[in-house]
Amino acid sequence: MTERHPRLLACAELDWQDGTPVSRSSGDIYFARTDGVRESRIVFLEGNELPRRLRTAPREFCIGETGFGTGLNFLLARRLFLDLAPPSARLHFVSFEHAPLREADRERFAAVLRARGETGLACDARQLSRQFPPPVAGWHRLVFDEGRVRLSLWLGDAVAGLTDWCHAAGRAADAWFLDGFAPSLNPELWAPSLARLVAARSRAGATLATFSVARSVRDALGDAGFALEKAPGPPGKREMLRGCAPGAWADPAPALPRSHVTVAGAGIAGATVARALAERGIAVRVLDPEGAATGASGNRHAVLHPRLPLDDGPRAAFLLAAAGFTHAWLERAPWAHAFEARPVLQFPERRRPERLERVRARFGDVDGHLRWHPGPAPLLEWPRGGRADLPALTKALLDHPAIDVRHEPLAPRHIAGERSDPLVLAAGAATDDLLDVPLGLGRMRGQLTRVHGLIAKEASILTGRGHAIPLADGWSVGSSYRRLDEASAPERQAPTAEERAENLERLRAWLSLRGLDGDPTALPADAMEDWVGVRANTPDRAPVVGLLSGGLWASTGHASSGLLTCPLAGEAIAAALCGEPPVFDAEVTALLAPSRLL
């Protein structure tokens, strides 16, 4: 029997009592029965003096939290930050949660807020729920307010998450919300080992606040170095606890990568890196001899959905995190016009029909991110899938005043020797041509066929080995996946009748399985048009994302999943260059590291 993937987490089991969520496992409440919003404001916002501190917040302000729960503290901190902080400031909120809420409970929480008159918070809670990641252990990154607010959410054991943050470079916390269940019910979240990790990831003079004044909590935090004091608690609780790390709090100089970054490649990989940096106030020069959205990024019909591996390794966690991030990211206003959200249905493969059932057994429903349709023709459904016009998306990403796109190649001097500013290689299949020691990327040819005149009654995108996208006047179907060797002549990249026939047969078979009429193989040749691109892949099927050597970075090898993985890769590189909290845990970082291929 196939076992569940070890990174999948069990969601919280809740009872709702008069609008208050109660944990079935511990019996504790998530917030005060009388007025949870007021309690959180008094304990965590005022307890850390945030109404005063945020008015003069530095360029970067970081809040750490143990116990994300419903997300109430994050919602309140985000709203306070947007109301008070200078326009140039950005908020990083880093939180840890072992048992995330199910989608149904998140939506119920939003309804409770609305019923209690907190209309604005209810809207924010629904926005958070729509972006919430699948319950997979590791880091998840959520972006709000055009990048002014970022949430780094660790799902899993808090000690493991804090340890990972301590080992990673990046900004430490300026304030802490310690908000686990009561120490008597959840002692792990108040243990001395965790208190020491909180102290290790605190800046000098960082503050903390918690509702608990238990002796065990005071001893753990005091031994970790915090100066503590009791303060009057919220209504219904006599006291709360406040603390301060040693030293005087002062804002450091921003950890910006000098003033400029050069990106080689103006496709989707380079554009996502460039945009992530530009939104952080960094000037970016993008070099590409062919211009924007050429090569594999010229595909007008790219599909968003992960094809999950069956092993225990971290690649599945990376792909699920990328799927959650990218779906929300694609709906952002500046480029939402280039994306159409549609469910994606995955058929069993002809060569390995049992694989689909094994994926279902391995990952379950992933809390609504994956659904199983049993029957004579079983299907997996990805409700948060869709398709994107990559040229339109890429050009929208590069349309930013801080981005300068130049139609010129990368000069060899940029690669060799010392460089004054960071350089990111994102040139797809051509990346190896820029390196003295190549990564060994493969070049994979893919042919898509556009079918006109065949009515597309299907509302979903169909996938298996390849994909078929229903369009207003037909289908886009593909793609072939054939390796090109170094001796392949340019004409080998022209469309072939053989690959067109394979695409049409793929579509015919899927339409038959769905009970839809139409035989694309019988259509005349003038009802077809083809497009060919060459993609870069790696031997282990994971992209290359990270530091190559001093100041030289890479985002490449995304193969046929560039729409899925490039946005999170761009976020990760920009976060690392800007000294932010981590986007990937140590295991995923190693999976993607360029050094694994050298």
Image: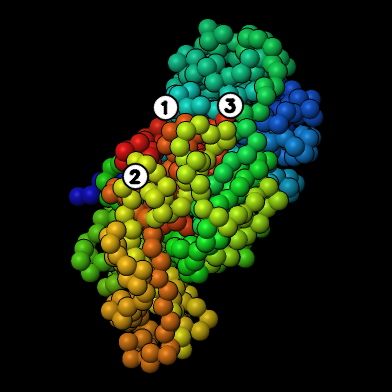
Residue type for callout 3: Arg
Q: 10 Å neighbourhood of mark 2: few (<14), some, or many (≥20)? A: many
Tell me how far mark 2 sits from mark 1, CA to CA: 32 Å
Relative to 545, residue 41 above or below: above
248 relative to 434 in the view: left or right: right
Residue at 58% x, 24% y is: 172
Relative to 457, residue 203 above or below: above
Q: Nearer the viewer, residue 79 or 101?
A: 79
If the image is split into quadrants, where does the C terminus sit? top left
Residue 19 appears anywhere in the view: no
Tell me how far mark 3 sits from mark 2, CA to CA: 31 Å
- Residue 571: give x, y in percent of width and height: 54, 44
Closer to the chain start, of discs 2 and 1, is 1
The colour scheme applied to this rendered structure is rainbow
Tell me where residue 480 sits by quadrant: bottom left
Relative to 116, residue 466 above or below: below
Give the structural element (helix, strand or loop) at label 2: loop
Residue at 42% x, 37% y is: 548
Tell me where residue 420 sits by quadrant: top right
Residue type for callout 2: Leu
Q: Which residue is mark 1?
A: 160
444 relative to 223 in the view: left or right: left
- Residue 81: give x, y in percent of width and height: 73, 35
Answer whether labels 3 and 2 touch (C-beta < 8 Å): no
501 relative to 527 in the view: left or right: left
Q: Which residue is mark 3?
A: 171
- Residue 115: give x, y in percent of width and height: 70, 49
The label shown at residue 439 is 2
Q: 10 Å neighbourhood of mark 3: few (<14), some, or many (≥20)? A: many
